[in-house]
Amino acid sequence: MTASLSPSSFHSRRTARSLAPRRLLAALGLVAGLVSAASAQTVMRINISIGKDSHQGVAIDTFAKEVEQRTAGRYKIETFYAGSLGGERESIESVQLGTQALTLTSTGPVPNFVPDARILDIPFLFRDKAHAHAVLDGPIGQEMSKKFEPKGFKVLAWCDNGVRHMTNSKRDVNLPDDLKGLKMRTMENPVHVAAYKSLGIVTTPMAFPEVFTALQQGTVDGQENPLSVIMAAKFDQVQKHVSLTGHVFSPAVFLMNKSMFDKLSADDQKAFMEAAKAGTVANRARVDADDAKGVEYLRSKGVTVIDNIDKAKFAAKMAPVLADFEKQFGKDNIDRIRNTK
Ligand code: EAX
């Protein structure tokens, strides 16, 4: 190093010599280690609107662990829960802007960003979870994922929010007419709002983090969500009546900022996609477990659960609005989903 001949570096060399050589080496090594660890690790955030102990919590926890493992720690995923970084709509917006790398969200607020995604939230569209999985994990899901890209999102994987059921604090709901006049919080989703209005519900779209308080204070009488969410959010503390209406399957989706995804190496892109798939596996297993124990759990909390709902009656009441969805989103597109085996 020619620079070592300059007076100042000579001076610093002398200063260095005055330190015990081993301690100096250790100190330099530590500094170098910190610098390389800091420069080699990229930290990204992912969040959900519900608590950690939930079907979405296991999804992002699994994803974070898998990304770290599959990239040998070059990527660290920080996980945030219970809307601490905002509700779903806000979080999707942060991912679109790139102020946050990732989010896991129900499709509820997604149509505000990707209008084509409205089709996924049509009531009584999916026969059951297996049907929904076949659609989302197959060609239709892949085509839908592509529609997110011009809007600034990369879909890493589809997963489940679950099959939604009605809850309220006022009365047992056995038949569609029992819903008439109930003030219910809905997701910020135009398809849900139109469908629930047709049942006579007074709809109040609201971000999820506000829902518990709104139910507690009686701002709204009820809401609808899968058993997984009802339990995770402890809605049994503020709702007395649950009806297993199963009126809509609610997908969830791992979203990443598209340009951040594009900047990853091909191997790392694969690692993120595989990690999200592992998150989906954990998520769906938890949804199944929640669905299996949910009714008993809620009854043990003193909630009345009506589990013999005639769903055909609810579908019949919604028939005009369902026909209108066929016009809006294309009967062919809807039939293609319906006909998926
Ligand atoms: O994603 O907003 C909702 O009702 C969602 O189902 C919930 O936040 C879980």
Image (cartoon, rainbow, N blue to C red):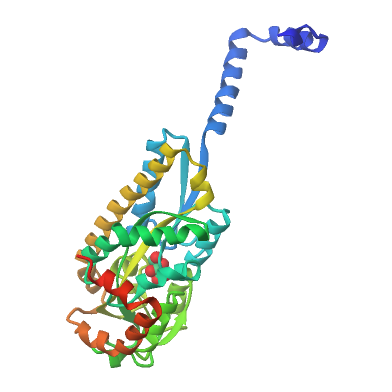
**Can residue 108 be seen?**
no
Position of 92 with respect to 59 (left or right) is right
The residue located at (46%, 82%) in the rendering is: 204
**Is 273 situated above or below 161?**
above
Residue 192 at what x, y percent from top left? 39, 78
Which residue is nearer to you in this view: 133 or 4?
Answer: 133
**Is 135 situated above or below 272?**
below
Position of 17 with respect to 262 (left or right) is right
Query: Hey, which quadrant is residue 81 in on the image?
Result: bottom left
Residue 142 at what x, y percent from top left? 35, 57
**Can residue 133 be seen?**
yes
Residue 312 at what x, y percent from top left? 21, 84
The residue located at (30%, 65%) in the rendering is: 228
**Is 102 situated above or below 237?**
above
The residue located at (52%, 43%) in the rendering is: 263
Query: Hey, which quadrant is residue 39 in on the image?
Result: top right
**Is 61 situated above or below 189?**
above
Residue 296 at what x, y percent from top left? 20, 70
Which residue is situated farthest in the right direction here? 7
Which residue is situated farthest in the left direction here? 308
